[in-house]
Image (spheres, grey):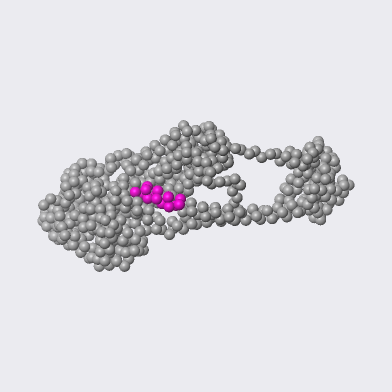
Amino acid sequence: MKPTVYVKDFSLTLGSKEIVHKLNFEVKPGEVFAFLGANGSGKTSTIRSLLGLYEATSGKTHINGRQYTAKDAQSVGYLPEERGLYTRVSAIDNLIYFGEMKGMSRSDARAAGMAFLEEVGLADKATLKLKKLSGGQQQKVQLGVAVMGNPSLLILDEPTKGLDPVNRKLLLDIVENHREQGAAVIYITHLMEEVERLADRMIIIKNGRAEAYGTVKEVKKKFNATSIEDIFVSIYNDEPIKKGDK
Amino acid sequence: MSKLRSVVRHEYLTVVKQKGFWAYMIIMPLIFLLVFVLIGLANRSDNSSLEKTANDLKGVAVVDASGLVSPDIITASGQVLHPTSEYESLRKEVEAGDRKGLIYYPSDILENAKYETFVSGVDFVFSTSLNQVGSGLLQSSLYAPLGTDQKIILAQQGAEGVTTTYANGTTSIGFTRFIVPGAIAVMFFIILMFSIGYILTSIADEKENRSMEMALTYVSPRTLIIGKLVGVVLITLTQLVFFGLIGLVAALIAINTDFMKLPANFDLSSLPIDPVSVLFGLGFLVAGFVLFAACMALIAVLLPSKQANNFSALFYILPFVPAWFLVTVLTDPSNPVVQFITFFPITAPTTALVRNTVGNMSVGEASLSLAIIAVTAAIVLWLVIKVFPKGALEFQNALSLRSIFSKK
C-alpha cells in the first residue's frame, strides 16, 4: 500500500536556524499517526513544509506521491495550531468558502457544510456570524472545514485543545470515523491519552530530529515503557525510564 | 479560475454584507451635506446681518473738511452731510452712543491720505463697512469728473474678462473642459479615502484571526492576493456607483431648489471631452489604484496588524502632498518641487491627476509619470506575491529584509 505521506531526509532551515534535520516518516491510508514533540520542536514547520507553505531545504515531503500544492486541496484537510476562520462571516458561509477552495461546487459545499453542522449539533447556528459562536463551537466549525470533502489526509494540530469532554469525545469519534473510511490522519497533540486511544503509529521529535518512530507498540517496546507519556518525558529530560514507570 | 471567483466573491460579500460598510457610506456624505447646509445657513445669516449693517450705514453722519467729497454722492449713498462746525459735537454723540457712526475727511487729506471714522460700540462688521463706505464716497467723488455713472462705475470696478477657450477646434465655456478629467481626479480621491484600506483590513484581519494559514493551504498566494485585489475593485465600483447616485440626487435637489446655480449657457450634452486628457486620467486612476492597493497589501503582509494600520497612514498622507503646493502645481508646473511630486511614485497619481485636470501637463510628462506609476505598481505587486506566503504566516513580528529575499 502506497503511503499517503512520505517524508524522506527532510531538513528545513529558516533564516540561519536549522528547524528540522533529516526527518523520515510515512503515514499510510487508514491510520492515525501521532506526531509528537514539545513546543518549538519543529512539528508545525514540518507540517507547513508538507503543505508547501515552507520550502524544504533538502529532502522530500510528499503527499500522495508528489509535493503538495493548492491544486491538490481536495486531498487534504488541515486544522492548524494557529487556527481561526472568518469571524465576520456566518458558520455555513465559512464552510462553503473552504469547500469551494477544496474544489467542491457551491451547492455540494453547502450540503456538506449543513450535514456537518447537523452532525455536531450546530445546524440552528448555521447562519450566525462566527464571532457570535462560543470558542468550542467555532472549533467544531474549523474541524468541519478540515473534514469537508472527505480528504485522503487529515492533519489535525491539537484538535481537542479547549474542548469540554463531551465535545472532545464527539471530535475524536469524527476522527475515528474518517480513519475507518480510509483517511490517513496526522494527529498532533500534547495529550498522551489521546495518542494511546487513537494512534496506530507515532513519531516523537526533539529539536527537529526523530527520537522515536514506529507503531505505538514498537516504540513502547524499544523504550521498555508502558506509557507514551513516560517515553516523551524520558526523551525530553534525557533520562532513562525509571523502573517504577514501566 | 473557480477558486479565484470564490475568493473574489468572498472578499466582496464579506465587506458589503457588513452594516458598517453601508453606515460609513451613508454617514460620510451626510456629514458633508450637513457641513454644506451649515455653510449655506451661515451665508444666509450673513446676508441678513449685512442688511442690518447697510441700514445702520444709511444714518451715518459725514463731515467733509477737505472739500473733495461730492454732497450729491453722499446723499445718493444714503449718508447725511453735516457742516464742518458740527464735527466735534457729532463725534461726542458717537462717543456717548447716541449716534452709530461718523466719517470725517480732514482738510489735509491730500497730504496724509488719511480720513477718520468713529464707531459706537464694538462692531467689527459695521466698522469695516464704514471704512469701505468712507473710501467709496471719496473714490466716487474723485471719479465724478469723468462724467456718466457708467464711466465712474467702470473706472471704480474695472471690467470682467470673458475667456473663450478653443479646444480641438471647438469653442467651449472655460471651466467645462475641466469637468471630465476633474471628475476622474475626484473619483481617485474617493477611492483613496474609502476603498484602498479594505485590502489592508482584509489581509490584516486574516493574520489577526489566524485564518490565513487555512486559506493558504487550499489556495495559492497568487490567487488569494489577486482575488483580494479584484474584490476591492468591485467594492470600489459599488462605492462609486453609490456615491454617484447620491451626488446626482443631491445635485438635482440643489439645482431645483436654487441652492446651486449652473451657468446660464451650461449644456451637459455639449460637455467637451478631450480624449487625450481623459485617457491619461483613466490611466492614472487605474495605475494609481493598483499601486496604492498593492502598497497596502505589502505593508499588511510585512507587518503585524497593528503596526500595519499605523504605517498605512503614510499612504493616506503622501498622496495629498500636491494639495500643500496646489497654487504652485496649478501655476508653475516646471517648478522643481512640482516636477518631483509629478514623478515620485506615491505622489505622482494625485499630482498628475490635478495637472491633467487643469491641462498644464505635456503628453511627454504624462506618459513618463504614468509609466513610473505603472512600473512601480507592477514591482510592488510582484513583491506582494513573492513575500505573501512568508509574511502571511508571520503573525507576531515584522518580516525581516533577509527573509524577504531568502528562499521561502
Which residue lies at the image location 16% right of the left edge and 47% below the top edge? Answer: A65
Q: Is residue B134 left or right of residue B22?
A: right
Q: Between residues B378 and B267, which one lies in front from this camera angle?
A: B267
Residue A96 seen in the figure = yes
**Residue interval drawn in magenta:** B227-241
Q: Between residues A141 and A94, which one lies in front from this camera angle?
A: A94
Q: In this view, does B161 lie to the left or right of A110?
A: right
What is the x, y in percent for residue B125?
Answer: 71, 50
Q: Between residues A196 and B93, which one lies in front from this camera angle?
A: B93
What is the x, y in percent for residue A245?
Answer: 15, 60
- Identify whether B140 is placed above or below B46: above
Which residue lies at the image location 45% right of the left edge and 39% below the top edge? Answer: B279
What is the x, y in percent for residue B236?
Answer: 42, 50
Residue A158 seen in the figure = no
Q: Is the magenta stretch mostly helix, strand or loop?
A: helix
Any magenta on residue B310? no
Which residue lies at the image location 24% right of the left edge and 51% below the top edge? Answer: A73
What is the x, y in percent for residue B154?
Answer: 72, 39
Any magenta on residue B234? yes
Q: How many labels does the image show?
A: 0
Quarter of the view holding residue B383 = top left
Quarter that holds the C terminus of chain B: top left
Which residue lies at the image location 58% right of the left edge and 53% below the top edge? Answer: B255
